[in-house]
Image (cartoon, rainbow, N blue to C red):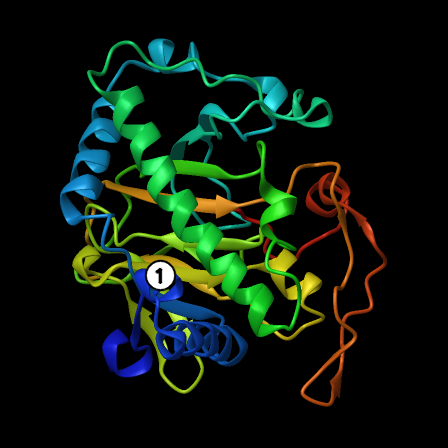
Amino acid sequence: MRSLNQALSSLCLEDFASQSNTKRTCFIDHLGNSLEKFGFVKIKVPSLKTKHLKKGYKIARLFFNLSHERKMNYYRAESMGLTGYLKVPNNQDYNFVDLEMWMTKSDQPPVAASLKMYPNNGWPQEVLEFQTHTKLLYRLFENCAKVCLKACAFYLGLKENVFTDKVKQGGSILRYLHYLPSLTADKHKDKIILDEHEDVTLISLFTAGSTPGLEIKIDGFGWLPISHDKDGVILAGADMLKFLSGGVFKGGAHRVCFRNGAVQDRVTIIYSSLPRPEVVLEPLISSFKGKSSQIFIPSMSTADYMYKVPHPRKVSS
Ligand SMILES: [Fe+2]
């Protein structure tokens, strides 16, 4: 199996804000080219250190180790799985074992139309530093996502804030995911825990997780495991970005696979950039580099896009 480093070179987030026009232009071109060709970009984020992620895995695990009754105190039915705690039962459609999540929304007050979908998180009091550290992680991931969305806009020849305006004040979610041990895993065999899919968001930022499992699909390379947080985060293009870019950017296909009969549980962190529910989605360009858009879906609100359009593999994590 070829390595991730052979497929994707790494960008440094700070190059976007560099005084050097060459570095900034390189960042934009590299990010845009990589999303256009593969649907993925590997990004070093100097402010987001491995110790921050390890602490995130630790506090997430402490929360998930609470009793079911305590965790359900943080379930927010009205949020449709966008804030608080959620237990997702074993689902044959997506082929995953039991999965549970904690979702954190932005600190920013949501606009009126978003209030119903983004109720307050209600922070767990049982885990020391859960709130402060999660908020820190949210800010670090949010900053990375904003820079990358601005770079996407420049690459397409659009105004800098065309994507970030759609996500501000409440759209994006930081998730802690907990894959419970797969007790039926056969020793020495590989088991796909979450089937291949693309996310239904603008972009997703992936971490390697507490234990291996995440794999991304790169044209010409096949499935590649993501195994080192020290290499930075993986940015995956997602469904809405593909739609808004008129099909210029690809969606990044990914899956979770436990190799060699591994049965340990797994905690990971994912940040998803998501427009506010009332934001209207429509292709922002009709052609790029002489090629016409291949997107023929009518304009619609983000909420309708998420919940009314059938997606063959509709998973947002
Ligand atoms: Fe996903």
Image quadrant of residue 103? Answer: top left
Instruction: List the single residue furthest toward the bottom.
Output: 290
Q: Residue at x 54, y 48 (%)?
A: 315
Q: Position of residue 105 (x, y in %)?
A: 48, 29
On screen, 172 above or below 135? below
Q: Residue at x 43, y 14 (%)?
A: 74
On screen, 30 above or below 102? below
Residue flagged by tag 1: what amino acid is it? Ile
On screen, 255 above or below 274? below
Neighbour class for label 1 at 10 Å: few (<14), some, many (≥20)? many
Whether residue 177 is visible here, answered yes or no, is no
Mark 1 lies on residue: 234
Image quadrant of residue 232? Answer: bottom left
Instruction: List the single residue furthest toward the left.
Output: 51
Of 111 and 207, nearer the camera is 111
Image quadrant of residue 31? Answer: bottom left
Q: Position of residue 28 (x, y in %)?
A: 46, 72
